[in-house]
Image (cartoon, rainbow, N blue to C red):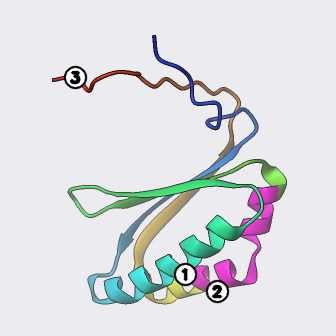
Amino acid sequence: MGQVDPGRPRVGQVVTVFRNRLRPEHEGGYRDELAVVADLARSMPGFVETKTFVAEDGERCTVVTFADAASHQGWRDHPRHREAQRHGVAGYYAEYSIAVGETSYASAFRHEGPAPT
């Protein structure tokens, strides 16, 4: 039987789901700023992880997790993050939505052994 990763997920973590579509003419600038902002997030107290996925239709989904509400608030309100948000609205995004929630239940599983064939 596999073991649970003790590092994540955990009850009380704050998870942001950021969905967006880029304006094609601004993808290069977006990628440059995303690299800066992602590095900033990783340096923040309480940062757990961030991952971005891109769907076949071009929609992007970034999931950012912080250890608790106070850590998330520090990230949300960081001046450089706020600046990036303004840049996104002014130039990068065709559309976006944000959902933020506190984890009320958490479970994980990892299979220990060879990958399935």
The x and y percentages for residue 79 are 74, 83
**Magenta span of residues:** 71-85
Q: Amino acid at mark 3?
A: Pro
Residue nearer the viewer, 60 or 112: 112
User: Along the horizontal axis of the image, is 47 left or right of 109?
Assistant: right
Nearer mark to the viewer, of 2 and 1: 1
Q: In this picture, is 69 found above or below 22? A: above
Q: How many dots with numbers?
A: 3
Task: Compute the Cα span from label 2 to label 1.
Answer: 12 Å
Q: Which residue is mark 3?
A: 116
Q: In this picture, is 86 found above or below 53? A: below
Task: Compute the Cα span from label 3 to label 1.
Answer: 37 Å
In the displayed image of the protein, which residue is found farthest to the top? 1
Predominant SS along the magenta part: helix
Nearer mark to the viewer, of 3 and 1: 3
- Image quadrant where one finds the C terminus: top left
Q: Amino acid at mark 1?
A: Val
The x and y percentages for residue 18 are 51, 59
Figure quadrant of residue 55: bottom left
Q: Which residue is mark 1?
A: 36
User: Is residue 105 visible in this depiction of the protein?
Assistant: yes
Q: In this picture, is 106 found above or below 85? A: above
User: Along the horizontal axis of the image, is 16 left or right of 33?
Assistant: right
**In magenta segment, residue 83:** yes
Q: Residue at x 64, y 37 (%)?
A: 7
Q: Amino acid at mark 2?
A: Glu
Q: Which residue is mark 2?
A: 83
Figure quadrant of residue 30: bottom left
Q: Secondary structure at mark 1?
A: helix
The x and y percentages for residue 22 are 35, 75
- Of the image marks 3 and 2, the number of the one nearer the N terminus: 2
